[in-house]
Amino acid sequence: MSEQESEQEKAIKDAAQALGRGRLVAFPTETVYGLGADASNEDALKKLYDVKGRPSSHPVIVHLAHAEEAEKWCTNISEAAIVLGQIFWPGPLTLVLRKKKHVLDLVTGGQDTVAIRVPSHPIAQALLQEFGGGIAAPSANRFGRLSPTTAEDVRSEFGDEVAVVLDGGACEIGIESTIVDVSGDRPRILRPGMIQAETLAVVLEELGFVPEGDSGTVPRVPGSTASHYAPNTPVKLVSSADFSAFLEELEHQGTDTAVLAFRAPPVLHRHWITAARFPAHYAHNLYRNLRKLDAVGADLLLVEEPPLDGEWVGIWDRLLRASGSKQAEEECDGS
């Protein structure tokens, strides 16, 4: 065993012990870094909400080591849930199911459903197995702000408010998990991610899949507020067709603008990042790019709109919420 592996194993043991003592730890998943607390410890959950500044009505996701552990937290597990778990777990999928009586209201936001996920990141898996229980873990950032995709993001956000920060490098996917409600008669997407609606529809073809969570009453889930995943700098989304003219007008007005665009800057621009054109690469870098541009202290963060197709739905959702905008959401959901 290398010295690095030994140090990581010790850090994982320390993190599991900290969770057992009711403290908070941060750990990497394949999506973003999570801020974890013992999901069965009410005092630890209160600390989690307090440190994040998260409303108690906003539920958190319980992370589990194995799909079989869902039975400890959920009841009336549907055929759709079983199928999705078999195919996508471990992985970037969260399922919303009916909760068992012992599940705390601070986990569910007072609802009769609970969100669960089995992450695939090896450090997350090692921590869950060492801890031996469910870890309630929203993203490791202040409520409503940009999610962290590196350990340094977490440290800069919380400092010593977190007992242990496990460093797994940059997160592979870069945006949060797809959330699917399987608590009712028909499964439906409540938050898009990088698992596409078309893929889910094929898997659930005979189970009455609803691509959008916009019909009837649906559970509240993480990241569902109109303004979320937001930098401090105001964000403006502009179509490709209007982008050049809009930027020119801003410069004419003297607005200090940071830019995330698919094109290269027309002239030397101090705060410009040229984005990847492949959705997986764009998602991987999205929060990192927004953090970099936010840090320059510009008046406005201008983002060129991505394509409106299935591979970009989760990215569109994050950009719309970063801008505090709900426009075009119906176009994005399930497309």
Image: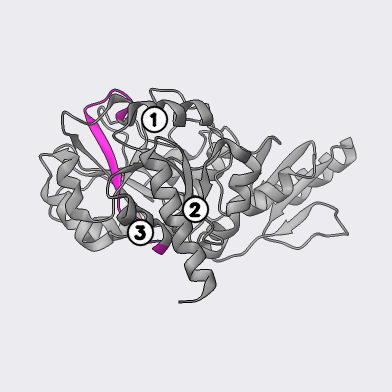
Mark 2 residue type: Leu
Q: Which residue is drawn at 60% across and 50% down?
A: 287
Q: Which mark is residue 308?
A: 2
Q: Does the magenta stretch include residue 121?
A: yes
Distance (Cα) linking label 3 and label 2? 34 Å
Q: Residue 317 carries which label?
A: none
Secondary structure beneath label 3: helix
Secondary structure beneath label 2: loop
**Considering only order in the chain, which callout, 2 or 1, is on the residue closer to the N terminus?**
1
**Considering only order in the chain, which callout, 1 or 3, is on the residue closer to the N terminus?**
1
Q: Which residue is drawn at 80% across and 51% down?
A: 271
Q: Name the residue under label 1.
A: 45
From the viewer's perspective, is the residue at label 1 or at label 2 nearer? Answer: 1
Q: Which residue in the rendered view is the most extreme toward the bottom?
A: 1
Q: Magenta part of the protein: which range?
A: 108-122
Rendered view: 260 above or below 112: below
Quadrant in which the N terminus appears: bottom left
Rendered view: 66 above or below 296: below
Task: Say left or right for 308 vs 45.
Answer: right
Please tell me in which quadrant of the rendered image residue 278 appears: bottom right
Mark 1 residue type: Leu
Rendered view: 138 above or below 27: above
Q: Is residue 195 visible?
A: no
Q: Mark 3 points at which residue?
A: 125
Task: Say left or right for 146 vs 242.
Answer: left
Mark 3 residue type: Gln
Distance (Cα) linking label 1 and label 2? 38 Å
